[in-house]
Image: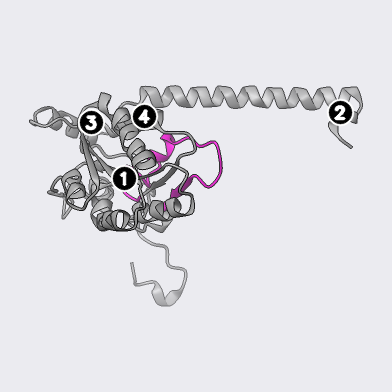
Amino acid sequence: MSATRRLDGQTLVCDSNKAERAEQIKAEKAAWEKELDDWTHERDPYSLDMIEEAKGEDSSYLHPRQVLRELEKAMPEDVMVSTDIGNININSVANSYLRFEKPRSFFAAMSWGNCGYAFPTIIGAKVAAPHRPAISYAGDGAWGMSMSEVMTCVRHNIPVTAVVFHNRQWGAEKKNQVDFYNRRFVAGELDNQSFAGIALAMGAEGLVVDKLEDVGPALQKAVDMQMNDGKTCIVEIMCTRELGDPFRRDALSKPIRFLEKYKDYV
């Protein structure tokens, strides 16, 4: 029996519960949006040190959270987004700034940890749904593992947009070295060439962004090239070396061995 044919009292109670729940969800969303607006940068001691260090550098570097907020605001309707692993992406920082109105829109590696996942995944999504804007997020480490697929996009006319967070480091690994090894860093730094320049050499388009006000317009320009000109574009965003919370806090904790024969393997 449909709700409209139930007794008036039952229908009123049902409608009242729905209205209260809707208001509760609305308030929770508003509180979360305010928290994201106020959270302009990471606040841990290491990140604060990196923010101060960036002030003394010649180049201009952006706070990743502010970049993610600007990207979110510039997202087109019906967008598909893939995120890679790394400190900006898999640790759910990027996920907090993504909004979707329909299913089959978000593709994330999550706990599989397959570095270099985002770009080939969004290429496949674009082939499956060529009418939808397709955008991938990756840090510079993960991007180094997948950027040769730009030539695949150019060669086979599969236009997509790739956002690369260029923070000159293996961020997830460095976060472990901060948390577990008192900042004793090993093989965490990256000395990269211009990813936008490499994209141009491969026949795609490339944009470099080092001002916050240019983030949204750059994404919109890249998506316009994708949807109207059939071009792949890499948006290279220069970021500070801030480090967000890890996706797993137990990454380097001592394992628990349940079988006797493995007790000595720690």
> The disc labelled 2 sits on which kind of residue?
Thr
Q: Which of marks 2 and 1 precedes in the sequence?
A: 2
Are dots 1 and 2 in contact, CB under 8 Å?
A: no
Which colour scheme appears in the figure? one colour
Could you tell whether 124 is left or right of 86 in the image? right
> The disc labelled 3 sits on which kind of residue?
Leu
Q: Which of marks 4 and 1 precedes in the sequence?
A: 4
The residue tagged 2 is 4
Question: Outermost residue toward the front?
Answer: 229
Q: Relative to 241, does residue 15 appear above or below in the rendering?
A: above
Which numbered dot is residue 231?
A: 1
Query: What is the quadrant of residue 186 in the picture?
Result: bottom left
Residue 87 colored magenta?
Answer: yes
> The disc labelled 4 sits on which kind of residue?
Arg
Q: Which residues are magenta?
A: 84-110
The residue tagged 4 is 69
Q: Nearer the viewer, mark 1 or mark 4?
A: 1
Q: CA gap, disc 4 to disc 2?
A: 42 Å
Q: Give how far across and how far down residue 175 sits, in percent.
A: 26, 46
Q: Which of marks 3 and 2 precedes in the sequence?
A: 2
Element class at badge 2: helix
Q: Give how far across and how far down residue 33 sits, in percent.
A: 46, 25
